[in-house]
Image (tube, rainbow, N blue to C red):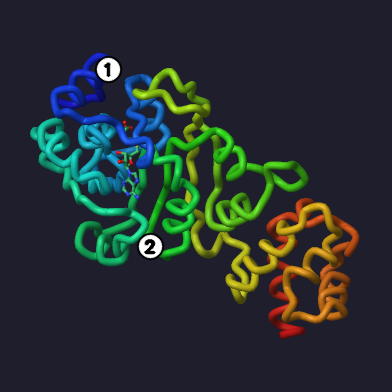
Amino acid sequence: MSGGYTLSETREIIKRFGIKPSKGLGQNFLTDKNILGKMVTAAELNQNDQVLEIGPGIGTLTRELAAKVGEVVAVEIDKRLVPVLGHTLKYCANVEVINADILTFDLKSLWKDHFTGRVKVVANLPYYVTSPIIMRLLEENIPLERIVVMVQKEVAQRMNAGPGGKDYGALSIAVQYRSRPSIVAEIPPTVFVPPPKVASAIIRLDIKDADLRCAVKDERLLFRLVRAAFGQRRKTLINALGSGLSSIAKEDLAEALEGCGIDRRRRGETLSIEEFCRLADYIYEKIM
Ligand code: SAM
């Protein structure tokens, strides 16, 4: 048996196992097969794929994935759901469930033990930890091909935003430094049990090969600059960087901005990723 669960099937399963969905763990179970289909289509899955699912819940998306790919590893924090998954996934021989917190679990050994190539992550994420999960996946240097996730709509917009708008910030740059995002669909609260308070969106992040990134000499410096530039959005760039990066003299920052052809009176939120990268490399090479 494969396929996701409808609203009444979901209610029946959680009732049968006596599960009260936990708000604290972001448990909003998806109950719409068309939307599961959109996630699976966006991930462009095939039988050779190895998939990591974060937060399988009662296994509705997991069953869709298991029918399409070679192997699924599903990491679920809530041990109450382990027997539910044992039931809903009993005919899915290509799924392994791991009861763990994805934020502290050793991802390098997860890869070593379970995967052989580049992995696709497909998940309906718990909204309270969306950004830390995405950042962890992007920063750990694990072989990834694509991430397709359901997130809060506002977070999807921030990941996808370009320079100049209110949504553009440190998350946009971190995501776009390592991937090409695209919003696949906006999703109303009504398709979840229980419904979340916010609208959702499916976002797809295609991981950039290392040679397609504007790879900087020092990534930590890049993200220090980004945090400083967005830390005080209403200040001019020179003032925001001056107060956010106290270890670099203001004259040096002014010289770096001029050397990169970036007007010091601009605001941080107008800088493209390429400009941030140029500035980081200039500071790394000529000032530090
Ligand atoms: N995949 C299911 C679905 O689509 O119906 C459930 C999605 S629900 C939004 C999020 C799931 O993530 C829940 O099952 C929750 O218990 C799990 N979860 C929350 N925090 C987690 C963490 N830190 N690590 C792993 N799973 C987590």
Q: Which residue is mark 1?
A: 6
Location of the C terminus (image quadrant): bottom right
Distance (Cα) linking label 1 and label 2: 34 Å
- Beta carbon at label 1 within 8 Å of ligand 1: no
**From this viewpoint, is residue 103 visible?**
yes
Q: Bin the neighbour count of mark 2 within 10 Å (Cα to Cα): few under 14, some 14-19, many 20 and up.
A: some
Residue 17: image location, x then y, percent: 14, 29
- Which residue occupies the extreme top position in the image? 8
Three-letter residue code for mark 1: Thr
Left or right of 145: which side holds 72? left
Establish if 112 lies above or below 190. below
Determine which of the numbered discs, if any, sits on residue 142 in the image: 2
Q: Is residue 112 left or right of residue 119?
A: left
The picture places residue 7, in percent across and down from the top left corner, at 29, 16
Q: Quadrant of ligand 1?
A: top left
The residue at 19%/18% (across/down) is 12
Report the quarter where the N terminus lies.
top left
At mark 2, the secondary structure is loop
Q: Earlier in the sequence, mark 1 or mark 2?
A: 1
Residue at the spot 21% in from the left edge and 44% down from the top edge? 70
Q: Position of residue 136 (x, y in %)?
A: 44, 58
Residue 180 position, x and y percent, is 55, 47
- Residue 48 shows in this picture: no
C-beta proximity under 8 Å, tags 1 and 2: no
| Helix, strand or loop under label 1 | loop
Residue at horizontal 21 percent and vertical 30 percent from the top:
19
Name which residue type carries label 2.
Answer: Ile
Crowding at mark 1 (Cα within 10 Å: few <14, some 14-19, many 20+): some
Foreground pick, 214 / 97 = 97
